[in-house]
Image (cartoon, rainbow, N blue to C red):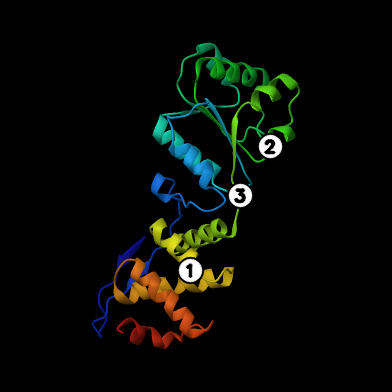
């Protein structure tokens, strides 16, 4: 979040960044689609045209599983089930969508999971599960539950370089209390040098350019930052150069 600061004696307007807690945005337009998550993203966005009722998203921490689950909830009205809810949900029946997060790590009622998956397969009730591990690696007491879980249509999410750089840029801008359109993040990632150091330098440069120009971070600012980084050949401009550069 930023607040305008009254002009100083030179007539320039700056902005004061307030140190507030950053909450990641998790809407449809905020999801950053890359090589490692595109298929899983298409699956969620295709709802309700699912030919099979149970979907499983598998991927490491921070790969976007929970973000996709939130998008699914917004699109379907799905409720997030607690670990002890499954038996009651299965007995209640119906086709109201359900989300089961971290099935491989939370202590879900195993008998309830068995009955809920059976009910879903029988009545075509949409269920979205997320996990870090493949079903074969889940700590399950019975093969019956594992066999039902294996009938889920599974999609992997991988932390590719593009996704990691995208997440880093979102975090860097978030730390500055700046919201940037995901399309601008994608524009940057497709054209920037693949390094964490470059992500830090670009985020800082774009923030400074936006402040100097007195506006938001736009695609034109992203393009300008990329061009300046190319011309600089890896060198950051001196602090005193920014006011001059912003007026070019």
- CA separation, marks 2 and 1? 34 Å
- CA separation, marks 1 and 3? 21 Å
Asked whether 22 or 49 is in front, the reply is 49
Up/down of 138 relative to 110, above or below: below
Q: Is residue 221 visible?
A: yes
- CA separation, marks 3 and 2? 13 Å
Could you classify mark 3 by the number of other residues whose Cα lies within 10 Å: few (under 14), some (14-19), or many (20 or more)? many
Q: Position of residue 241 (x, y in %)?
A: 40, 87
Q: Position of residue 79 (x, y in %)?
A: 47, 28
| Mark closest to the chain's N terminus, 3 or 2 | 2
Q: Please report the residue visible at 54 percent of the width from the left and 53 percent of the height from the top.
A: 35
In this figure, which residue is indicated by the disc labeled 3? Answer: 158
In this figure, which residue is indicated by the disc labeled 1? Answer: 191
Mark in the foreground, 2 or 1 = 1
Q: Say left or right for 163 vs 5.
A: right
Q: Say left or right for 71 vs 4.
A: right
Quadrant assignment, res 121: top right
Q: Is residue 217 visible?
A: no
Image quadrant in which the C terminus is located = bottom left
Q: Position of residue 188 (x, y in %)?
A: 45, 66
Image quadrant in which the N terminus is located = bottom left
Q: Position of residue 210 (x, y in %)?
A: 35, 72
Could you classify mark 1 by the number of other residues whose Cα lies within 10 Å: few (under 14), some (14-19), or many (20 or more)? few
In this figure, which residue is indicated by the disc labeled 2? Answer: 134
Q: Secondary structure at mark 2?
A: loop
Q: Please report the residue visible at 76 percent of the width from the left and 23 percent of the height from the top.
A: 141
């Amino acid at each position: 979040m930023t607040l305008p600061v009254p002009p100083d004696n030179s007539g320039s307007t700056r902005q004061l960044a307030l140190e507030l807690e950053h909450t990641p945005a998790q809407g449809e337009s905020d999801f950053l689609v890359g090589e490692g998550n595109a298929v899983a993203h298409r699956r969620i966005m295709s709802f309700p045209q699912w030919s099979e009722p149970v979907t499983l998203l598998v991927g490491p921490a921070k790969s976007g599983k929970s973000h996709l689950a939130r998008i699914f909830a917004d699109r379907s009205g799905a409720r997030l089930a607690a670990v002890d809810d499954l038996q009651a949900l299965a007995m209640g029946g119906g086709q109201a969508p359900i989300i089961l997060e971290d099935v491989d790590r939370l202590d879900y009622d195993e008998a309830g999971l068995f009955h809920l998956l059976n009910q879903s397969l029988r009545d075509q009730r949409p269920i979205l599960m997320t996990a870090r591990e493949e079903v074969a690696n889940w700590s399950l007491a019975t093969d019956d539950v594992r066999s039902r879980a294996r009938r889920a249509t599974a999609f992997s999410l991988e932390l590719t370089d593009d996704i990691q750089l995208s997440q880093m840029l979102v975090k860097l801008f978030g730390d500055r209390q700046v919201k940037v359109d995901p399309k601008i993040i994608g524009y940057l990632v497709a054209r920037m040098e693949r390094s964490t150091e470059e992500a830090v330098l670009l985020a800082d440069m774009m923030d400074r350019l936006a402040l100097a120009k007195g506006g938001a971070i736009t695609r034109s600012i992203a393009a300008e930052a990329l061009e300046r980084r190319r011309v600089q050949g890896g060198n950051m401009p001196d602090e005193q150069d920014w006011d001059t550069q912003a007026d070019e």
